[in-house]
Image (spheres, rainbow, N blue to C red):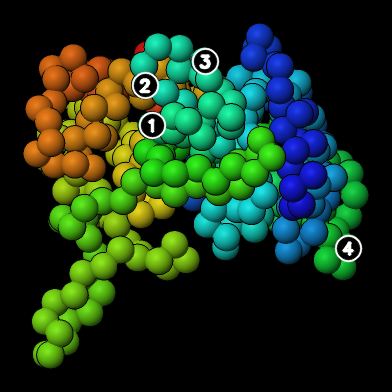
Amino acid sequence: MKLNEVKELNKLLQNHSNGRNKEHSVYVDNLHTSFVEFEEKFILPSTSVFEIEFSAAESFLKSLIQLAPELVSDSLVLPEPRPKRDIDRLFLIKPFYTEGEMFRENSPEIWREKLPSFAIVTSFHVMHLGGAPKEDIYAQASQGKTMSVYTNRAYFSSRVIPLDSLTVLEDAVIDFTAKKYEESDFMVQISRDTFEGVRHTYSEIFDEVDYSKQVSFIHESLGITPADWSLGKIFAPLAVEYLTLTARFLDPSLDRIAKDFNSFHQVVDLLLRPGSMTLEESARNSFFAWLRSHKSERIISPSGNMAWKILRV
């Protein structure tokens, strides 16, 4: 999207911080994708099959402002998906601090002077690829355009990313870089050559790399057991993404995400910079309390696929 379009969408998302989400439930489907399901339906707009167009983003965000303001309020739209291959998704970013009022300085002008430590990056699946019942079709797909449907689901992904920099232009966030791992066990071996020996490197952002071993190592180093994280492989609470370590959330409220994360952010700090500090007992307790608060119930969706309803206790 163009800069002026991004700025228009940013204005649309401002000043809704007092709004409360409509009645909803959170699920994870059999493809490990999370979605929030509302009691009422909205129109998922048609868009180009090559990108999320401004008109589609505007229509989608207007619906979410009414249904789930806590998930999008005061966020900033990224002009391009991150990673760029995710052309079917609309990306929002909301930087925050770990001390004082988290969003007290939610302003690009202030961010230039004092970079926030973290950001919540939330993506939404906007493109509908088919399969809707006839009665839910608002507009059929056409050449180069996706189908528009009535739906009560918003597929989303929210993760907290440790920031290394923000690229700001005319009060819009254009891009960000994450704090990378130092050379450590989280590097991925990509080749073994007689002359070069073993070479380790970070994957490029477009590579499909399986980080399951690295994530298993993280769980082991923290002492996470199935009793602590009962969702198992349904959903990963920690992941290696954006060349860094991210915490992943199933909560449609950015304020709650930031508060939860701030209670245990030292866990991520320690993993990013091994040996730089000692993990405080309060941070460890908060982290495990957050893990244990997640429960799930298995259901069968109307299409016959398995899904899991997420419960917070």
Using residue 265 as the reference point, say whether residue 87 is left or right of it: right
- From the image, tell me which residue sits under label 3: 104
State the mark number for residue 98. Answer: 2
Give how far across and how far down residue 126 sits, in percent.
70, 46
Give how far across and how far down residue 234 sits, in percent.
38, 41
Query: Type of residue at label 3?
Result: Arg
Q: The C terminus lies in which quarter of the figure?
A: top left
- Quadrant in which residue 298 is drawn: top left
Using the numbered discs, state the Cα–Cα distance from disc 1 to disc 4 in whole angstroms: 44 Å
- From the image, tell me which residue sits under label 1: 117
Query: Type of residue at label 2?
Result: Thr
Whichever of callouts 1 and 3 sits on the residue coming sooner in the sequence is 3
Using residue 265 as the reference point, say whether residue 73 is left or right of it: right
User: Mark 1 and mark 2 in contact (Cβ < 8 Å)?
Assistant: yes
- Quadrant in which residue 189 is drawn: bottom left
Q: Secondary structure at mark 3?
A: loop
Whichever of callouts 4 and 3 sits on the residue coming sooner in the sequence is 3
User: Mark 3 and mark 4 in contact (Cβ < 8 Å)?
Assistant: no
Task: Between residue 88 and residue 38, name the one nearer to us.
Answer: 88
Image point (61%, 19%), residue name? 70
Question: Residue farthest to the top?
Answer: 18
- From the image, tell me which residue sits under label 4: 142
Using residue 212 as the reference point, say whether residue 277 is left or right of it: left
Give how far across and how far down residue 77 sits, in percent.
66, 40
201 vs 133: above or below? below
Query: Type of residue at label 4?
Result: Ser
10 Å neighbourhood of mark 3: few (<14), some, or many (≥20)? Answer: few
Image point (90%, 49%), residue name? 139
